[in-house]
Amino acid sequence: MRSNFFSAAALLAVAQLVAAQTSTECQPLEKKCPDDLALGTTKSIDFTAGESSDFFALPGTTLKHTADGVEFDITNEKQAPTMESNWYFFFGSVEVVMKASDGRGIVSSFVLESDDLDEVDWEWIGSDTTQVQSNYFGKGDDSTFDRGGFHGVSNPQSEFHTYRLDWTAEKLVWSIDGAAVRTLLYADAKAGTRYPQTPMKVKIGSWVAGSSTAPKGTVEWAGGLAVWTNNPTYKMVVKSVKVVDANTGAKSYSYGDMTGSWQSIKIDNKSTGNAGSGSESSTKVSSTVAPTSTKAPSSTATKVSSTETKESSTSTKESSSSMTTVVSSSSTGAPNATATDGSSSTDASSDPTSTGPSTPVNSTGAGAKLGANLAMVGAVVAFFAL
């Protein structure tokens, strides 16, 4: 059984590693940054059937497309195959059908991440056949280790399961196979200041946490050193991804100021091809359904397989006349919330969109919380070290 105890020294080492690796191309909390390309619609991507223009492979990544979906293979400890969405979404939902990689020391990750380092995670340890871990971060703040949770799931490495996130300005719900397992309210994330609330891109990948050069704490969290005897191939398989952007028709998102609040995000609804006409179709966004945003990838990005129709949006040219600021229909302040537990969860049979009371996350105590937060290191190392 994996130990839930992590030494203070190991924890500190991991925290320092996180601080060193976490980065963003442009930090909107410090300066004006380019607009993010918005998804602005619902996108269902079937990776069992072909290539997709919605995701690109990060440098050094080779993906294999099979009848089961897109496969992320690891054959040595230096590999971290990862793909990233071409767009951002600003509130809505995201759902992935996948099998995590097996193998001690191997970590599979499904991460939402914004330009100002808001983050929401699902992570799987290859040797843990009974659990998945959840986590979140606001503005890249990793100063505390009380945000993680463990959630039961049967054989995540050998069976496909559906993992879902429902994300609004008021709450964030993690669900497995249709059952909600955790709910985070806006008010419970340091009064909303550390609630993930800015446009997110999607990053999916696997990496070797149990490498020979990894910090001791990271190796402990990953279940031990990865095994390379007999030249194994550790495989993570993603069958499909579905993303719903709450802001239908949005073309781009931008930060209206340097606060990083959801109220400051501006949505450009201007239709492509009408840039000179001044016409627009902007709508007021409710506090319960906040918009999404996306950022165009590097021109050197590699195309990833999918059968989804390509986005017709070809430009994110900013027009001041087509910018609308997200405001609450009931208040311009923080959304209302009633729960007081910072890492709450709903009953397994509850509706992910339910506003009923929350109960504490099912974790195995302080050690589990530390372990879940150490999980974030995996996403950081794999997604930023490349």
Image (cartoon, rainbow, N blue to C red):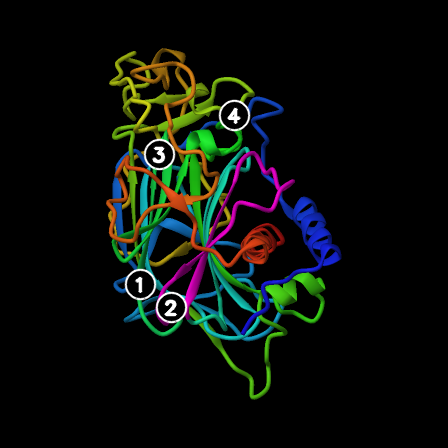
Q: Quadrant of the C terminus?
A: bottom right
Q: Nearer the viewer, residue 274 or 28?
A: 28
The image quadrant of residue 198 is: top left
Query: Residue placed at 71% from the left, 59% from the top?
Result: 7
Please, what is the three-letter code of the amino acid marked with disc 4?
Gly
Report helix, strand or loop for mark 3. Answer: loop
CB of mark 2 within 8 Å of CB of mark 3? Answer: no
Q: Which residues are magenta?
A: 130-156
Report helix, strand or loop for mark 4. Answer: loop
What label does residue 156 carry, if any? 2
Query: Residue placed at 53% from the left, 36% from the top?
Result: 138
The image quadrant of residue 211 is: bottom right
Name the residue tied to disc 4: 260
Name the residue tied to disc 3: 91
Q: Position of residue 185 (x, y in %)?
A: 40, 34
Please, what is the three-letter code of the amino acid marked with disc 3?
Phe
Q: Gap in Å between the C-alphas at discs 1 and 2?
A: 7 Å
CB of mark 3 within 8 Å of CB of mark 1? Answer: no
Q: Nearer the viewer, residue 331 or 96?
A: 331
211 to the left or right of 188: right
Q: Position of residue 184 (x, y in %)?
A: 41, 39
320 to the left or right of 281: right
Q: Specify whether residue 144 is painted magenta.
A: yes
Q: Is residue 89 above or below residue 225?
A: above
Q: Gap in Å between the C-alphas at discs 2 and 3?
A: 27 Å
Name the residue tied to disc 1: 161
Earlier-in-chain disc, 3 versus 4: 3
Between label 2 and label 3, give the one nearer the viewer.
Answer: 2
Q: Is residue 351 above or below residue 227?
A: above
